[in-house]
Image (tube, helix red, strand yellow):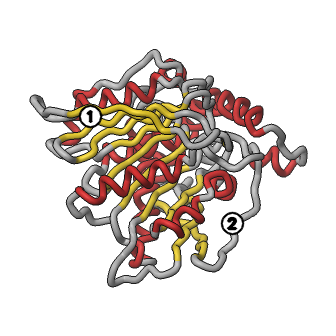
Amino acid sequence: MARRKSPLVSALFKLTRAGVRQSTKIGKAATRQGIAAGGRIASSARHVMSGIATPADAPASVTGGRWHEGRWGLGPLAMRRYRLFIPAGATTRRPIPLLLLLHGCAQDTAAFAASTRCAAVARERGFAVLMPEQAQEANPQRCWNWFGSDARVGMETRVLMAIVNHAVSAHPRIGGPLFAIGLSAGGSMALTLGLEHPERFVAVGSHSGAAPHSAVTPLQAGQTMRGRRSPDAEPIARALNGRAAPPLLLIHGDFDPVVSFANAETSAGLWADLLPEGTKMSVASGEIRRGSRRRVTRQDWKVGRQPYVCLLRVHGLGHAWSGGAAGQAFSDPEGPDALRLAWQFFAAVMERAPDKAV
């Protein structure tokens, strides 16, 4: 007699098959654009099969910090690799902040670490970086599954939070305030995590990501990415059940041909709609100019003295990490350093935010 699969195993198989069908078209479009932006790709079959546009060497530990590697998740069918950078000097008596950094499509943790130069920024600013890696079995283009059914997206968020919990349990000295930011699909997933676990995240951010909770089917995802579809705030507010959405950072290029800049405006509008009725916000705008780097228009919304939404429009930037390393796909060295800008916002929020347990 054939053995029956457990409900959990059956659900995982169904979600995996659904993810393959729903994500291929979206991921291929982003991958093609990223390869062009990267300038060149390796021609070896190994690189093609990896699904990574511009592979990079594994980041090496240096004086001032150490990289750790591992695998964790929800069981054998929902495991993910991760890399964790912890700067020197962190102690359990005073745990340092933890940044969950999520790569985009056609990337892995090594490529994204090279593009963002996250270890150097983390050493300077005194925070740890946790980088989960999407598996090709979960998404052929290595995109985080930011759209789809509630079960599919929910499975993704549970896997990521399991990795966060495991990393903090294994390394208590990184149990300080928790933040998240990602690129493209990783940005959408970071915002989804913030809305599902607002009690855990001090602030979240998206770089060139689609508006969260805005699509179920691939057709809807394409409409969202083109700026033609928006999320419904009412069910999101009901799910929050009185909890406040975490402060939001948005970085987006106005020349993005993959995910329209309109998504950043839509996400900012969603966060405004999630405020309790009658909440007053102050708005300020300005510009950031750093030498010959791309110009940035900045808009800040505050509730009282607390930063709530910061929108950074990078002029002339395509679908790429602003200020990223040259030679990497989805990486634009001509823009201001996105990770430094992100941490500047996160640090400002942290100064005024109530303590949140990781």
- In the image shown, does 76 or 125 lie closer to the viewer? 125
* The C terminus lies in quadrant: bottom left
Q: Quadrant of residue 174?
A: bottom left
Tell me which amino acid carries mark 2.
Pro
**Residue picked out by circle 2:** 59
- The residue sitting at 90% across, 48% down in the picture is 44
Q: Callout 2: helix, strand or loop?
A: loop
Q: Callout 1: helix, strand or loop?
A: helix
Q: Quadrant of residue 162?
A: bottom left
**Residue picked out by circle 1:** 236
Looking at the image, residue 318 lies above or below residue 121:
above
**N-term mark: 2 or 1:** 2
Q: Residues within 10 Å of mark 1 (few under 14, many from 20)?
A: some
What percent of the width, then of the height, locates residue 52? 73, 46
- The residue sitting at 59% across, 76% down in the picture is 66
What percent of the width, then of the height, locates residue 217? 49, 24
Tell me which amino acid carries mark 1.
Ile
* Residue 14 seen anywhere in this rendered image of the structure: no
Q: Residue furthest front?
A: 291
Looking at the image, residue 170 lies above or below residue 318:
below
* Residue 107 seen anywhere in this rendered image of the structure: yes
